[in-house]
Amino acid sequence: MPGRKSVLFVFTSASRVLNGDPTGWYLPEAAHPYYEVEPHHDIDFAATKGPNPPIDGNSVVQLHYDEYQLRFLEDPVVQKKLRECKYLKDCKASDYDAIFYVGGRGPAIDLATDLDNIKLCNEVRSFSLLAPSHRFADKIRAMVAQFWQSGKIVSAVCHGPCALVNVQNADGTSIYKGKKYTGFSNVEEELIGGVTGLPFLLETKFQMAGGIYVKAEKPWLSNVVRDGKLITGQNPASAQAIGKALAAALAE
């Protein structure tokens, strides 16, 4: 059995979407993966703005509590990690074996365009940054061979895959091109009345990426897709399953 590995859980720092509605990270999409992974591996928390990333209040009041969610809210270790959440810009891919993006609508607001996040993604999977400034390009090129060979895990649930939509391969194509993946569907977004608050719809963005978007037969069903080191979950119902998939990948 492999020893304990290090995993970085990335949270949104966005507290509101474009139309002013409140948002934040989604409780089950943090709690379930955390307790699937934490018994076997070390976990750090990070967010674009560091300590105390905002929780989406709807994820607390609208869902039936379960053991994982109640424990997460009351766990002193977890609460300390949230209070002392690292700044994403201070995180180094070399310190981690996997990165997991917690859901909530916020990633579409901040992580999708955050250069520190894109930089970190690049380092983890040896992707190259193709942004107007190119300010990380030289550093990333030097890391390509090292991180490609290491094949670290990138995982995200629900709106978490929004954090990867502007990360590109060295040839300028989306990292999703040629991959199978999932994420929050357009129908699910419409059902929660969330369309007007976001800069883009994730499923539509996926369609532009050139890969294969796989969604559940019906909205709200659990659906996790793994393609190599890329592991994605569709919605809150997928939270426990993606935690198990991430734990299994780390155990390989």
Image (tube, helix red, strand yellow):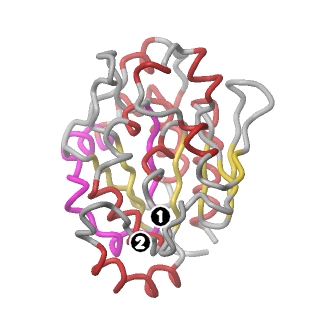
Front in this rendered view, residue 251 or 124: 124
> Looking at the figure, which quarter contains the C terminus?
bottom right
Asked whether the residues under the numbered discs 1 and 2 touch, taking CB atoms below 8 Å apart as contact, a structural biologist would say yes
> Is 187 placed left or right of 198 in the picture?
right
Dot 2: what SS? loop
The residue most toward the right is 217
Residue 78 colored magenta?
Answer: yes
Residue at the image position 31 percent from the left and 41 percent from the top: 110
- Quadrant for residue 122, please give it: bottom left
Q: Amino acid at mark 2?
A: Ser
Question: Start and end of the magenta stretch?
Answer: 77-104
Residue at the image position 44 percent from the left and 25 percent from the top: 70
Q: Give the image location of residue 57, x and y in percent.
A: 36, 18
Residue at the image position 45 percent from the left and 71 percent from the top: 127
Q: Amino acid at mark 1?
A: Gln
Residue 22 colored magenta?
Answer: no
> Is 140 placed left or right of 225 in the picture?
left
Front in this rendered view, residue 215 or 242: 215
> Is 223 placed left or right of 183 in the picture?
right
Residue at the image position 70 percent from the left and 24 percent from the top: 219
- Quadrant for residue 17, please give it: top left
Q: In the rendered image of this protein, does residue 125 appear above or below residue 238? A: below
Q: Give the image location of residue 58, x and y in percent.
A: 42, 16
> Looking at the figure, which quarter contains the N terminus?
bottom right
Residue wearing tag 1: 168
Marks 1/2: CA–CA distance: 6 Å
Q: Give the image location of residue 169, x and y in percent.
A: 50, 69
Q: Give the image location of residue 143, x and y in percent.
A: 37, 83
Residue wearing tag 2: 128
Residue 99, numbered label: none
- Disc on the earlier residue, 1 or 2: 2
Dot 1: what SS? loop
